[in-house]
Image: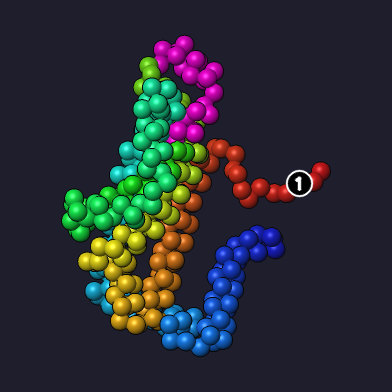
Amino acid sequence: MMSWRTLVSRLAPLLACLGLLGIWQIGALILDTDSFPTAIDALRAVPSILTDKESLINILASLRRMAIGFGVGVGLSIPLGLMMGRSRAVASFFNPLLMITYPVPKAALMPIIMLWLGVGDLAKTLVIFLGVSLPVVFHSFQGARAVEEKMLWSGAAMGLSAGQRMLRIVLPSALPEILIGCRTGLVLALITMITSEMIARQSGAGNILFNALDMGQYDTVFAMIIIVGAMGIGLDAAFEQLRKRLVRWSEPRFDLPLSFS
């Protein structure tokens, strides 16, 4: 039988969302302005967006760009972060470049990238790639640095080459930290996806949102915000399940039973 703690922990996200919607509904009724529709009006607009063929094509185009940018970012950033964590020369070369680009909002680069690459998919995907890369590089770097030297010495004593030690010792040991960076990168991919589409307005979820704002369709604007938020929650929950499967052997950081003994 499910304990009350387990039930509360499972219902907590739903209760939080319902509470937020309730605050939104009350606030909209108090303000009583067209630019801030009630939560009920926004929710009513969600089905019309999701059943519209053109809107679905735009949303799927956004997810495709996000998947490509995220996939390429993770595929390139993990090896780079691991090499930086195990090689002072590589870290010394790339650290200044990363420190320069880290504080710059990636959406701010969109106008420059548009001048170079136009306003098509490539420019938007590149912005998503840049948003994903930095947290994945950082966490991969931290994970690689945390690997115990004794394990590497043992691998070398067993005849493993530098590449084999990286794949068979460093990567598995750093995997929990790497996946934290990937989870952060997934959220940033969604954010940069929407902002890039709001700047380069041709297609995508950001384009739907901004066009609705221009035409004063505020219920559609807030409905798109709900849809994007639901996409973020769903993707994050799916990735968290994948993360738990991949690092089941490691000690979990959260959801530990409290003990005062």
Name the residue rendered at 22%, 66% in the picture. Answer: 202
Position in image of residue 255 (x %, y %)? 63, 50
Horizontal arrangement in the rendering, residue 211 relative to residue 171 (left or right): left
Q: Can residue 106 be seen in this view?
A: yes
Q: Is residue 132 above or below residue 28?
A: above
Quick one: 196 or 82, which is closer to the camera? 196
Quick one: 131 or 22, which is closer to the camera? 131
Quick one: 227 or 9, which is closer to the camera? 227
Name the residue rendered at 34%, 77% in the picture. Answer: 213
Name the residue rendered at 44%, 14% in the picture. Answer: 156
- Way the structure is coloured: rainbow
Q: How would you rate the neighbour count of disc 1 (Cα within 10 Å): few for under 14, some for 14-19, many for 20 or more?
A: few
Dominant SS type (magenta): helix
Q: Name the amino acid type tagged 1.
A: Ser
Name the residue rendered at 31%, 78% in the picture. Answer: 214
Residue 73 among magenta residues? no
Residue 153 among magenta residues? yes
Horizontal arrangement in the rendering, residue 199 relative to residue 104 (left or right): left
Q: Name the residue under label 1.
A: 259
Number of disc labels:
1
Q: Give the range drawn in magenta.
A: 140-160
Position in image of residue 128 (x %, y %)? 32, 52
Q: In which quarter of the image is residue 207?
A: bottom left
Position in image of residue 252 (x %, y %)? 59, 43
**Quarter that holds the C terminus:** top right
